[in-house]
Image (tube, rainbow, N blue to C red):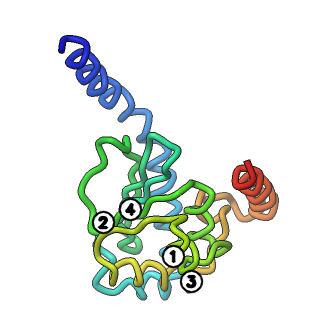
Amino acid sequence: MTGARRQGGSGRWETLLARPLLLPPSALLTFSLRRLARACPEAFARLGEHAEQLYLIAPTELPLAFHLRPAGASGEIWLVPARDAPEAAVRIRGALPDLLGLFDGTLDADSAFFSRRIQVEGDTSAVVALHNALEAADLTLADLIGAPKLTRDLVNRGLAWTTQRWRSA
């Protein structure tokens, strides 16, 4: 019993210590999201009433999850410890390369869902709105991480190569 308590307490400390480390990448992802919203307002308009919804995107192989509120120019993305992930209207789980493929359009969302490569829980109308917004935005991986315009081709090639290797591993 003491070992179980100690492990649980340690988990809390790990979470508290991890939170400050998650702030810089969260700020970068939020900046990228807001820049995309300014560049593609029509894509974000497709979210309609679901723009203020909270979406949790959880890579199955990472101890982190992405908490997304895609509210256009005021949208936010937070990296959170997966085990302490807050409630969300939608939860999308899958391998990171598959999740990235959904966001940049290289993976068909319907086939990924029906083949169980990704799992979706929650408000299905919010998921459909997010899917439609992503299709309209025509994103690349470089867009998702906020790469500068001059480096986007190089970043996209490097990330495509990396995710392809990850998928085949």
Mark 4–mark 2 CB contact (< 8 Å): yes
Which of these two is toward me, 165 or 1? 1
Which of these two is toward me, 61 or 150? 61
Q: Which residue is mark 2?
A: 54
Q: Position of residue 26 (x, y in %)?
A: 44, 49
Q: Residue at x 30, y 29 (%)?
A: 16
Q: CA distance from mark 4 to mark 3?
A: 17 Å
On screen, residue 36 above or below 148: below
Q: Say which label, 4 or 3, has the lower sequence index.
A: 4
Q: Residue at x 72, y 65 (%)?
A: 149
Q: Secondary structure at mark 4?
A: strand
Q: Say which label, 4 or 1, has the lower sequence index.
A: 4
**Tag shown at residue 135:** 3
Q: Position of residue 98 (x, y in %)?
A: 60, 62
Q: CA distance from mark 4 to mark 2?
A: 6 Å
Is disc 3 surrounded by few (<14), some (14 to 19) or many (20+) residues within 10 Å? some
Q: Say which label, 1 or 3, has the lower sequence index.
A: 1
Q: CA distance from mark 2 to mark 3?
A: 19 Å
| Amino acid carrying mark 4 in the image | Leu
User: Closer to the camera: disc 4 or disc 1?
Assistant: 1
Q: Position of residue 164 (x, y in %)?
A: 75, 57
**Tag shown at residue 114:** 1
**Tag shown at residue 68:** 4
| Amino acid carrying mark 2 in the image | Leu
Q: CA distance from mark 4 to mark 1?
A: 23 Å
